[in-house]
Amino acid sequence: MAISLVFLTYAIWSSCFTIGKATLAVSAPLFLTGTRMIVAAAILIAYVIIFNPKSLKLNKRQWLFIGLLGIFSIFIANALEFWGLQFLTAGKTCLIYSLTPFISAVLSYFQFGEKITYRKWIGLLIGFTSFIPIALEEKGLASLRNEQWSLVSMPELALVGAAIAAAYGWILLKKLGGEEAVSPITANGFSMLFGGILALLASGYFESWNPIPVSDSKIFLQGVFLNILVSNILCYNLYGFLLKKFSATFISFAGLTTPLFAALFGWAYLGEKIGLFFYIAIAIIGAGLFVVYMEERRLGYIKTKAIK
């Protein structure tokens, strides 16, 4: 079923957390983002040139949307996320990123006319509360009582900005694959190229090059290869195809399962313990997803035909 493909995509994508964490230990974030995106773009564009050259015939409007996708989804989202993550706890980061489905719902309303019914809001709110037990387990009750959780610091604002940029990026990708009729591989390839170039330019300005901001070339190259294979080649394009069948709101909301899959990977491969709060979060997200999914089917935003 296509719904299974949604969760499979996020399950695979969540493995990038471990890969990225190891790679960032030996590389500056902007340089890593730029290198990864440009190499991935070269692979995708080469594929398009060889197997689907007709998809390169794009008009100015389509190129404009691809450029915006590169700016928001590739450059701004990654730059703000990596910078903010240096200063924030995992619990707070999850809570801030849980704004993404709400942002997607509002943007989808203005961009595509997708209705935000009270049932959908109920489902979204249920999903939002799932990060409360995740945060409690991450920090502990005593730590949370002593931590200030108001969104006032620059790192927190950076993560909010990253969530907004990411949500807007998926809206642009859905628009490109829908009414603009641009192949997801073409859109992703050129947006990654544009966003990657911007990231490298920013790296040259903000990060120390001596000669490049990498301390271990072997680990860096391994991390870049795995990130490109899993995230840029597989998951980005799966996401583009899924947006043809599901609404941007539902796909974004399903992304709340990513930290849960990451926890499962940590348990399976790193021996990390999973406590009671983890299972509570799974139950809450499952309930919220069910409410949103049924409402989207009722409204006709989720198609019943197979993906082509």
Image: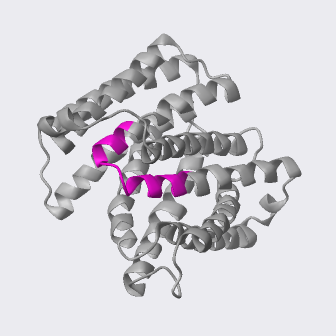
For residue 299, above or below residue 176? above
Q: Is residue 246 visible?
A: no
Q: Residue at x 32, y 41 (%)?
A: 92
Residue 302 % position (x, y): 54, 29
Residue 95 % position (x, y): 35, 37
Residue 93 belongs to magenta span: yes
Q: Which residues are magenta?
A: 77-95
Compared across the picture, whether 303 is left or right of 227 comes to right
Tell me the quadrant of the picture where the N terminus can be found. Answer: top left
Residue sitting at the far right: 59
Residue 82 belongs to magenta span: yes
Q: Is residue 93 visible?
A: yes
Q: Residue at x 47, y 18 (%)?
A: 120
Compared across the picture, whether 293 is left or right of 268 comes to right
Q: Residue at x 87, y 52 (%)?
A: 59
Q: Residue at x 74, y 64 (%)?
A: 52
In terms of depth relative to the viewer, which is nearer, 85 or 302? Answer: 85
Kindly report the secondary structure that dominates the magenta region of the rendered protein: helix
Residue 113 % position (x, y): 67, 22
